[in-house]
Image (cartoon, rainbow, N blue to C red):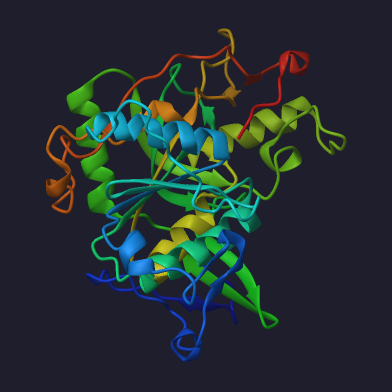
Amino acid sequence: MASPGAETEKPGNHNDFVQLCNPHVAAIKEDVLYHFSLSTSTHDFPTMFGDVKFVCVGGSPSRMKAFIKYIAVELGLDHPGAEYPNICEGTDRYAMFKVGPVLSVSHGMGIPSIAIMLHKLIKLLYHARCSDVTLIRIGTSGGIVLEPGSVVITRQAVDGCFKQEFEQIVLGKRMVRNTHLDDRLVQELVRCSADLGEFPTVVGNTMCTLDFYEGQGRLDGALCSYAEKDKQEYLRAAYEAGTRNIEMESSVFAAMCNACGLRGGSLGRSSPNCPPSPPPPRVSSRAPPIASLGLAPALPPRRVSGPLRWDLLGLSRGPRQGPQCLCRDSRATERPER
C-alpha cells in the first residue's frame, strides 16, 4: 500500500505497438541511445529491429552471447561459421545480440543498471515500430526453501518489506509503480514447465533488494548489522509472505513493463539448496549459466509472432554447477556471478 502523498502510476495498456510514457520523446530530433552506442540518425531501427518479438535480458554479456547462440540453434537459424556480433560494440556498458525475432541484451547488476538499459531498450523498440513484444528476464537468484535447480516464475516483485511496489523519488516526490507481472504469461510459462517436466517450477513473489549483502541477509559482507537468528527469522517471514526467491532487478523490470504496456515475465533459477538442516528456511544463491533458460520453438520462425505456447517458448536444463549457499556455516558461501 502506498503511503499518503505517494503518486501511484497506473499500468499502461497492452497495445500492439510499443508505446512510451514520455510525451517529450516525440519532439526529439535525434534520439541518441548513448549506452547502446546507437542513434536514430545513424541507424535504421525499423530495418534492424522491426521484426523483434521476444526480448530476453540477463546480467552478463558473456551469458547473453551464449544464450543467443543457443537460440540460433533452437530456431534452426544457426549455420557453420555463424557469428553473432555485439550490436552495442561501440560501448562497454551493455551487450546486445540478435537472431531472427529474438533480441538478447545484458543489463548488468542491480536496479540502476537494468533501469538505464530498459529506458534505452524500450525506446529502441518504439523507434523500430515493434509490435506484440514479450520481454523476459532470465537469470540467477537466491531461492528460499526450493528443490535443487528450481525455477521461480515471478508473479509479482516485492521490496525488502514485502510490499508489492517499486518506489522511486521523482522531482522530490515519491512515485510508486505497479510490480505485478503479466498473469497470462505466468500461466503460459507454468504450462511450458509442466509439458517439459524436467525440473521443479514454482510460481511466487520475487524479492528485489537494493544490494547483494545486507539487503539479502548475508553474513559475509564487509558490513553486517544482525545475527544469524535475525537472518533466519527474516527469511521465514519472507517465505510466509509468498516470497520464493531473491535478486536485484525484478521490481524495476516489472514496473517499467507495466508502465509502457509491455508483456513481461521473469524467470529465476536457484542452485541446489544447502545440506539438509532443520527449519528455519535456507537460501541458495547460484544458478547454472543463463543459457540454460531459453526459447525453444519447434515451429518455423515465421510463427513466432502468435500467442506464446509451449512450442514457442520453453525451458531447457543445462549442467548444474556446485552449490552456493547461505546456510548456517557462512564460511562455505561463495560469491555467485550475476
Residue 85 seen in the figure: yes
Q: Position of residue 71 (x, y in %)?
A: 32, 34
Q: Position of residue 122 (x, y in %)?
A: 43, 66
Q: Position of residue 35 (x, y in %)?
A: 61, 61
Quadrant of the image containing the C terminus: top right
Looking at this view, name the residue that lies furthest to the front. Answer: 81
Looking at this view, name the residue that lies furthest to the bottom. Answer: 27
From the viewer's perspective, tell me whether residue 90 is left or right of residue 255. right
From the viewer's perspective, tell me whether residue 159 is left or right of residue 135. right
**Taking 169 as reference, is 192 above or below it?**
above
Residue ID at (70%, 35%): 217
Looking at this view, is 274 or 77 the one in front? 77
Residue ID at (41%, 76%): 20
Q: Position of residue 152 (x, y in %)?
A: 41, 34
Residue ID at (27%, 50%): 101
Residue ID at (32%, 24%): 316
Looking at this view, name the residue that lies furthest to the right. Answer: 222
Residue 164 seen in the figure: no
Tell me the quarter of the picture where residue 60 sits.
top right
From the viewer's perspective, tell me whether residue 137 is left or right of residue 338. left
Looking at this view, is 189 or 104 the one in front? 104
**Taking 11 as reference, is 319 above or below it?**
above
Looking at this view, name the residue that lies furthest to the top. Answer: 276
From the viewer's perspective, tell me whether residue 243 is left or right of residue 224. left
Looking at this view, is 279 or 306 the one in front? 306
Number of numbered discs present?
0
